Amino acid sequence: MKKVNKICCIGAGYVGGPTMSVIASQCPEITVTVVDINQARIDQWNDSNLDNLPVYEPGLKEIVEKTRGKNLFFTTEVDKAIDEAEIIFISVNTPTKTYGKGKGQAADLKFVELCARNIAKIAKTDKIVVEKSTLPVRTASAIKSILENTGNGVKFEILSNPEFLAEGTAVEDLLNADRVLIGGDETPSGQEAKDTLSSIYAHWLPKERILQTNVWSSELSKLVANAFLAQRVSSINAISALCERTDANIAEVSRAIGTDSRIGSKFLNASVGFGGSCFQKDILNLVYISRSFGLNEVADYWEQVIIMNDYQKRRFAENIISTLYNTVSGKKIVFFGWAFKKDTNDTRESAAIDIADALLEEKAEIVVYDPKVSAERIYADLDYLETRSPEENRRLLTVVTNPMDAVQDAHAIAILTEWDEFKGYSWETIFTKMLKPAFVFDGRRLLSQQEMEAKGFQYYKIGQS
Ligand code: UDX
Ligand code: UDX
């Protein structure tokens, strides 16, 4: 096992930032340098006002406050950090390809390759290179060939160490991980590298939670873990549609099946649909890899999870249109929530984006309130779809910072993110401000049907009639 003095992480994003902050806080004897090509993002990480950190995660700013400038550093000096480190994490974005072969499905590895080529160019001492980004299975062999064919003759060991943190609970997930997965070659030098990285996590996690595998099993496990989690959400969402037609109650069904220890109760909350940077991207990747091996039945099986998720979002929007007398043209619809889930400012693949887009196509006028997401982010999400002009998006959709302003003379409210503050609102007051009948479409099963109907609302809750 090698002694580690310096760690470098390339990519100060939602994964790289929190992960390295936790490592620095648990390993005070190790200097952790997080680098990024994006100067603005690095400036935010170095901002003296910790409320301006680029990633909002409960507990993160306290850790950054404790370690930043001591053994945790954020910089754009990529080459220097690579040169000095024994372990280099690659945590750059691997978005779904938007061009060429595998467009809309395959992972775009251009940034990962750029990182590997840069490491090969700079490194003058042996390095352990760790895949932290989610990568298609067998990427490690591509990285290995780049490093070995363009390197300065130094020795590289490639490890796969996928991240399983969920946003909104990143710090807790890192400090109290169910498991850490480390995949590497089954050679003496591969084993030594696996043990070296294990020793980092062993600073705060019990050994039995540090799993070592071959590198391919680790790469694949990450995709499969997300596919299984997303499949549970799509499965319970599929049943939510059946509940609405049969007067069954999805919460009772979830509890009835979730108490079976073989099924388990987690990830059985019916919703307007899953979002986030990973689920859809990783399943599309799994589908693409399966098809590239000619495993079409496998690909079709997993693709259904995304088809069901798109259906859940579509039927939520269609239900609003049909319930509002089959037209929402010129009607004021309030969105409570835009983030893909509570306790994060991340909106990637959020269900709210597609539902807003569908209602704007019907000429609805939408007013959005989200406690953590900026108007700039909301417009950027809509403009990215290119369904209409940015001017049209800004004419039809407005963003407010006070929810009570939003509901004045509104026809309907749609709850898209499960922020706790929505439960504490004076819904009596909201009722007085809305046009009548006052419709509420609860895509997150946040409120009580009895209470809302007692207040006079026409209340729709996903998963029950
Ligand atoms: C990343 C991966 O995208 C995802 O596949 C994996 O599941 C988790 O890690 P995330 O941290 O959420 O996800 O990405 P993002 O927040 O976009 O951060 C990536 C950072 O890498 C960005 O700040 C970007 O500027 C930086 N980057 C990208 C570099 O520093 N160098 C590059 O060459 C490319
Ligand atoms: C996910 C994985 O959980 C994490 O392990 C991986 O590293 C990255 O991807 P994240 O996307 O941050 O994390 O959020 P997660 O809590 O998994 O939620 C994903 C989506 O599913 C959200 O939109 C959430 O609202 C939705 N969801 C989750 C449901 O609709 N119902 C559920 O029961 C659980």
Image (cartoon, helix red, strand yellow):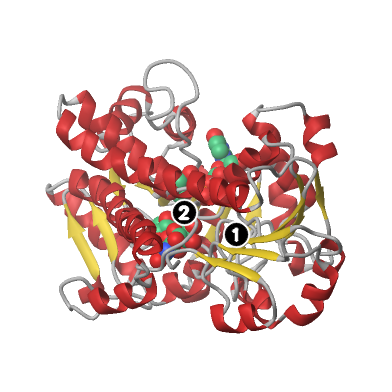
Q: Residue at x 32, y 60 (%)?
A: 239
The amino acid beneath tag 2 is: Gly
- Residue 370 appears in the picture as rendered: yes
Secondary structure, mark 2, is: loop
Q: Quadrant of the C terminus?
A: bottom left
Give the residue number, with chain letter if any, for mark 2: 273
Q: Which quarter of the figure has residue 202?
A: bottom left
- Residue 165 appears in the picture as rendered: no
In the rendered image, residue 155, in percent from the top left (x then y), is placed at: 29, 39
Secondary structure, mark 1, is: loop
Give the residue number, with chain letter if any, for mark 1: 416
* Distance between mark 1 and mark 2 Cα atoms: 9 Å
Q: Residues within 10 Å of mark 1 (few under 14, many from 20)?
A: many
Q: Quadrant of the N terminus?
A: bottom left
- 406 displayed left or right of 359: right
The number of discs equals: 2
In the rendered image, residue 192, in percent from the top left (x then y), is placed at: 21, 56
In the rendered image, residue 207, in percent from the top left (x then y), is placed at: 23, 75
Q: Residues within 10 Å of mark 2 (few under 14, many from 20)?
A: many
Q: Is mark 1 in CB contact (under 8 Å) with mark 2?
A: no
Q: Residue at x 81, y 63 (%)?
A: 435
Q: Residue at x 30, y 47 (%)?
A: 223
Q: Residue at x 67, y 72 (%)?
A: 457
The amino acid beneath tag 1 is: Leu
Q: Relative to 100, does residue 245 appear above or below in the rendering?
A: below
Q: Relative to 436, does residue 12 appear above or below in the rendering?
A: above
In front here: 283 or 186? 283
Q: Which quarter of the figure has residue 65?
A: bottom right
Q: Which mark is residue 404?
A: none
In the rendered image, residue 235, in percent from the top left (x then y), is placed at: 30, 56
User: For the residue with label 2, is its CB less than 8 Å from the closest atom of ligand 2?
Assistant: yes
